[in-house]
Image (cartoon, rainbow, N blue to C red):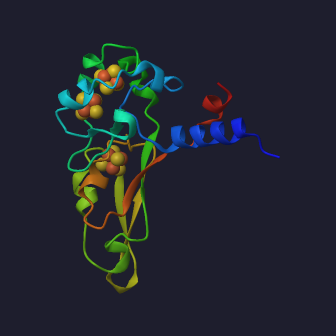
């Protein structure tokens, strides 16, 4: 029988896997390090941080993407956020079938919003065009997902490379 501890641990690791914390967030003990002060949310010039469940900060790009300016980490008085961990940002954009262009409605808003040039469109029959995302160019800023009028873009945890997986 599955133990209560295993269920709770499973739930926590599930939560840890899907909740997007600010850039540079401590991976394992963020809950313990964060004092819920909200300073990172207050200083973010792009407004991409909000206080979520338990007043813990969450990355939610609703109007802009993250510029990775580092202001949030600078404002954080504990080790909950640290600039040295910015390179570990695990999120990358993913486009779902709700994309207008895939369904024959002309739209290139995500492509226009991507400073990295990570989104290209491939013309299909019937006036449709399919976006393809270059995972190497995407930095996971979320600008495209904030801009998409169909809510078709989400940020998903990228697969670790083999070396990262072994680390
Ligand atoms: S790096 Fe800058 S833009 Fe990104 S969440 Fe932190 S403060 Fe906001
Ligand atoms: S500034 Fe640091 S301690 Fe304060 S809410 Fe943000 S992550 Fe938590
Ligand atoms: S999340 Fe990736 S694809 Fe979307 S705008 Fe940012 S860099 Fe471009």
Residue 160 image-quadrant placement? top right
- Residue ID at (47%, 21%): 32
Instruction: Note whether 96 is above or below 56 in the view shown.
Output: below
Residue nearest the viewer, comparing 77 with 123: 77
Instruction: Classify residue 133 as left or right of residue 74.
Output: right
Could you tell me which quadrant the C terminus lies in? Answer: top right
Q: Is residue 155 visible?
A: yes
Instruction: Classify residue 61 as left or right of residue 133.
Output: left
Residue 19 image-quadrant placement? top left
The x and y percentages for residue 83 are: 35, 19
The x and y percentages for residue 142 are: 32, 47
- Total tally of numbered discs in the picture: 0
Q: Looking at this rendering, what residue extends furthest in the bottom direction?
A: 126
The x and y percentages for residue 113 are: 23, 52
Instruction: Note whether 4 is above or below 24 in the view shown.
Output: below
- Residue ID at (22%, 56%): 112
Residue nearest the viewer, comparing 108 with 155: 155
Instruction: Note whether 114 is above or below 9 in the view shown.
Output: below
Q: Looking at this rendering, what residue extends furthest in the right direction?
A: 1
């Amino acid at each position: 029988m599955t133990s209560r501890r295993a269920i709770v641990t499973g739930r926590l690791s599930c939560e840890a896997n899907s909740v997007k914390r600010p850039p540079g967030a401590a991976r394992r003990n963020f809950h313990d390090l964060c004092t819920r002060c909200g300073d990172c949310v207050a200083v973010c010039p792009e407004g991409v941080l909000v206080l979520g469940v338990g007043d813990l900060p969450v990355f939610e790009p609703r109007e802009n993407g993250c510029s990775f300016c580092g202001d949030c980490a600078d404002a954080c008085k504990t080790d909950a956020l640290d600039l040295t961990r910015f390179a570990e940002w695990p999120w990358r954009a993913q486009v779902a079938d709700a994309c207008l262009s895939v369904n024959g409605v002309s739209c290139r808003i995500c492509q226009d919003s991507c400073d990295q040039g990570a989104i290209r469109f491939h013309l299909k029959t019937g006036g449709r065009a399919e976006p393809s995302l270059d995972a190497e160019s995407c930095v996971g800023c979320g600008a495209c997902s904030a801009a998409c009028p169909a809510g078709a873009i989400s940020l998903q945890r990228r697969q670790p490379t083999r070396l990262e997986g072994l680390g």
